[in-house]
Amino acid sequence: MKFSVVVIAKNEENTIPKLIKSLGDVDEVILCDTGSTDKTIEIAKSLGAKVVENRFNELITSKMAKSINALSKRNNEPDIVKAGDMSFNFSKARNWAASQAKNDIIFMPDCDEIVEWDLPAVEELWNNADRLEYNFIFAFDANGNPVIQFLHSKFYNRKKYAWFRHIHEILMPLIYTNKIEGWMTDTELNFLYELSKQYSTIAEIGSWKGRSTNALLSGCKGKVTAIDHFQGSDERDKTHGQDTYEQFKENTKQFSNLKVLRMTSEEAAKQVGSFEMVFIDGEHTYEGVKKDIELWLPKTTKIICGHDYSDVWPDVKRAVEEKLGKLPCADTIWYKVLKGGVPEVTSFKTLFTDKILLKHYQNPETLRTQYLKGLAIDNYQNEYNDRNAHYYARELRYRGWHKSAIEMFQRHIDNPGWSTEQGQSLIFMGDSFLDLAKLKRERK
């Protein structure tokens, strides 16, 4: 299947030739220029690319600036942004540029990257995929050897995926999503949403602030019973139990098909009857998961399922497999069908391919002057985005606003959805305490 390569560019005359030449005989190359003053447009056209032009700068209003700067004002530090400043919206740029292509399949590398691929084999893969993952080399050492490498995905069907977030934009499915704080991926939310359409009575064990509850309520035509004591899983959470419950109510207030049992899983199991579907996402200890399965399996008539069935949560996986055996899963949601056929769930197919290798060569001339503004706006627009909270804190620290940086690092540490960087936030926070000469806090 043919696809289009779409690139966002501004003043990339030194990188565009390498990228376009690496693409080979692709069906279409589109370059979306966002205000170049060098020869980017001229060079792209000479290499056969179709050039479109647009601007995606957004105004920082006085209301936004006031809210963003509240952080620095609390810490007696300079304002982070000013009313009237402009910031580039990366997701809008990517989505608009993708809309200009003639094909629905879009590959969207950055200008400072080159690709090595088996083009006919890649085109063949799209007969059975909605998105492709491939190896990506982010950085090389002085001898040209890879030093940072991971899986990457900017190759997708634009009818099924779109870009979200002002900066550090991410691809997300177009069926269902929400911005409620939590650790469930968008793929998992979509699975729950589609799954819940097929059952008229659902019990959810563990709801927290309602991220997964919202997905279940959005799909289910009958009643969803949310069971949670809303006291969290540790002492810190227990001090905020009422706040958590109020946030849960706010995040689910639009639904009339919700019943809430504010109690433990064991207490609820004694009071309720049966449910067609039960979703378990409460305690994550071996004993807790095992007990929840024992309590709710007898009360489930059609399908029982749960969250975090992965090696990251070995206690969850161990308990599930001891009670139910090895199970199929969607991302990390396990499920066991008790009655009826395997549920038909619209799931997008992501395939890994070794036919693509994308290489990144950082352009040392790229300016980062707008980076802080973009992160500030994203944290203003998205109440919870742990990844950008970490990057925002890091950028504040680089600029010497250590008190504000510490506050943002703490936000990420308290809610480490992006858990691999929690340790890095602690390290950076310690560095900021050191720069403030608060040595006891730095050592802690």
Image (cartoon, helix red, strand yellow):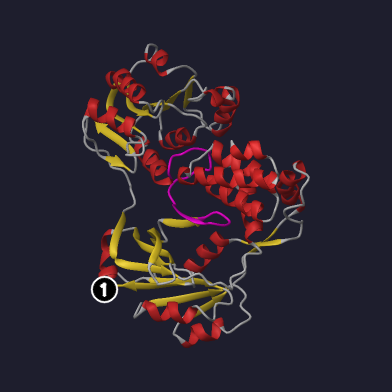
181 lies left or right of 142: right
160 lies left or right of 341: right
91 lies left or right of 133: right
For residue 162, above or below residue 144: above
- Inspect the magenta stretch and tell me whether residue 172 lies in it: yes
Identify the image quadrant of residue 352.
bottom left
Q: Nearer the viewer, residue 285 or 168?
A: 285
| Residue 109 position in % (x across, y down) | 44, 68
* Quadrant containing the N terminus in the rendered view: bottom left
Q: Residues within 10 Å of mark 1 (few under 14, many from 20)?
A: few
- Inspect the magenta stretch and tell me whether residue 223 lies in it: no
Which residue lies at the image location 26% right of the left edge and 63% below the top edge?
A: 127
* Quadrant containing the C terminus in the rendered view: top right
| Residue 20 position in % (x across, y down) | 43, 79
For residue 216, above or below residue 384: above
Q: Which residues are magenta?
A: 164-185
| Residue 117 position in % (x across, y down) | 31, 72
